[in-house]
Image: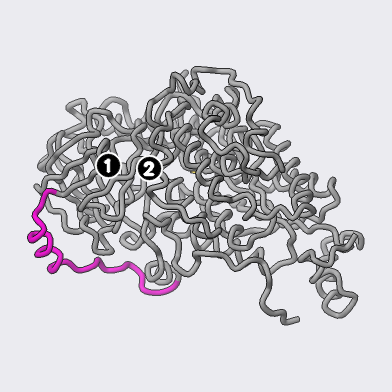
Amino acid sequence: MADKKRRSTAWFGPADRDGFVHRSWMRNQGRPSHLFDGRPVIGICNTWSELTPCNGHFRELAEHVKRGVYEMGGFPVEFPVMSLGETLMRPTTMLFRNLASMDVEESIRANPMDGVVLLTGCDKTTPSLMMGAASCGLPTIVCSGGPMLNGKFRGGELGSGTSVWQFSEDVRGGKITLQDFMDAEAGMSRSAGHCMTMGTASTMASMVEALGMGLPSNAAIPAADSRRKVVAHMVGRRIVEMVHEDLTIDKILTRQAFENAIMINGAIGGSTNAVVHLLALAGRIGIELSLDDWDRLGRDIPCLVNLMPSGQYLMEDFYYAGGLPATIREIGDRIHKDVLTVNGRTMWDNVKDAECFNREVIFEAATPFKESGGIVVLRGNLAPSGAILKPSAATPELMQHKGRAVVFEDIEDFKARIDDPDLDVEPDDVLVLKNCGPKGYPGFPEVGNLELPPKILEKGITDMVRISDARMSGTAYGTVVLHTSPEAAAGGTLALVQDGDVIELDVEGRRLHLDVADEELEKRRSAWSPPDQPMERGYYKLYVDHVLQADTGADLDFLVGASGAPVPRESH
Ligand code: FES
């Protein structure tokens, strides 16, 4: 049974001193001899952590993966990697996405694994694990942890994040009491799983399926549903077969797979965060993907899915309605049908018979939920390298807008002044936030969906144009221009905007323009200096010195590309 070419054989195969060391210490966990006979060794990369509540059920999920691996004659080995809990980590999990990806990459390469299962859930755990695994190139399959059950509160439904932003504005606008707000906490997060809106976690779980990296229905099955355990079990079975077939990750993550993912992101009204994560992932696998691909491929894709934050329903409803397979089938004429997926079948084979069971949740392509689901890429003197906007979450009347800038130099400046009744702001103004990009914060936080000033909210106005170099939570909404590149801290034009400047947004024309003469901008540029960094050592320094701009995925420059799985030297 031993396969000389199998990686793990280099550790467990030799009948010598080194082989003794590799096997003997593993036996202290009660492993019998036959597990070292050359069968595929499957790493189960686990992001379980009590500090990552969305992934809190992953130790149990890993056990179900192991059942499948054993069934197919494999040898499962579970290992932990850095876990990124979106709600607790400071200053922002995005600062650590690339660090976690390094942990994943080096953990895989340094250990005797022939194939890898990635257990992912909360926002950054999905991209970081895929990025790390892509740089290693082994057979890889993703098992998402699944969304929470629908939030419930006083007879209504609550959506993770989205309802928080809504309630928070309602408190500030005097529509509900603070006690009402506090009472909603427990009802929102009432089961295992990640955010159950079509936020970043659900979007990235959908991207896993859209890229062909997960089994059909991976994205939507709730964490609490017993069928999530079945998916884990089947993932365990399938990864062993993938090792035998040498179905490596680069055979799945092709240019066409990324193009499918971009189109499917439009169809689900997915998070803007998918842009930066897929660009970074493509960079790891050597696929040339650009911001313009997002605009081009998503331009005519209708949003079919009526889920918060763009719509009304939640992931549990999405699963019962048919989930991603039924959605992909609806846009079947547009996608690349023949791309290979991890189950060994093509994308179209996986979805061609998928049924929709609720047209309130998944609309037909001929009569979509919203005409435009894609991500718009804006350019102009304010964003020479690009900025993005999600039309399905924006207000149609604001997509063509000209307004006076109200500028905040950083997020602290914004927090200090936004509630000030004397703030000079009108509904037609444009809120501008600087220094929240990858280098500027540092870490590229989700603060781009700036709260509106109370004096505006009190007029019953719920949206204004907002522009920043930050990201936005996938659960947020509004006419929000994000990822402006180059960012302010890298000397982008955004750094030069001043109160009272006029900004033009033209979504149809893909234009973002600062109406200030070039000579004046040059004058301001010569007076500009980059902001101080809060930390000058450790990972912060590594990150700030090497992070790329948002338009190419905000990876670290030296992580772009892959090294494969060979180990350069061996010291035992
Ligand atoms: Fe973990 Fe939203 S906080 S997915």
Three-letter amino acid code at disc 1? Arg
Q: In this view, does 502 lie above or below 458?
A: below
Q: In this view, does 473 lie to the left or right of 232?
A: left
Disc number at residue 3? none
Label 2, on which residue?
Answer: 295
Q: In which quarter of the image is the C terminus?
A: bottom right
| Residue 412 % position (x, y) | 25, 54
Any part of residue 467 in sight: yes
Magenta region: 515-538
- Determine the CA span between mark 1 and mark 2: 9 Å
Does 516 lie within the magenta span?
yes
**Residue at 49% of width from left, 64% of height from top?**
560
Front residue (pair 216, 367): 367
Q: Residues within 10 Å of mark 2 (few under 14, many from 20)?
A: some
As helix, strand or loop, the secondary structure at mark 2 comes to helix
Q: In this view, does 301 lie to the left or right of 414?
A: right
Q: In this view, does 500 lie above or below 546?
A: above
Q: Do the residues labelled 1 and 2 touch (CB within 8 Å)?
A: yes
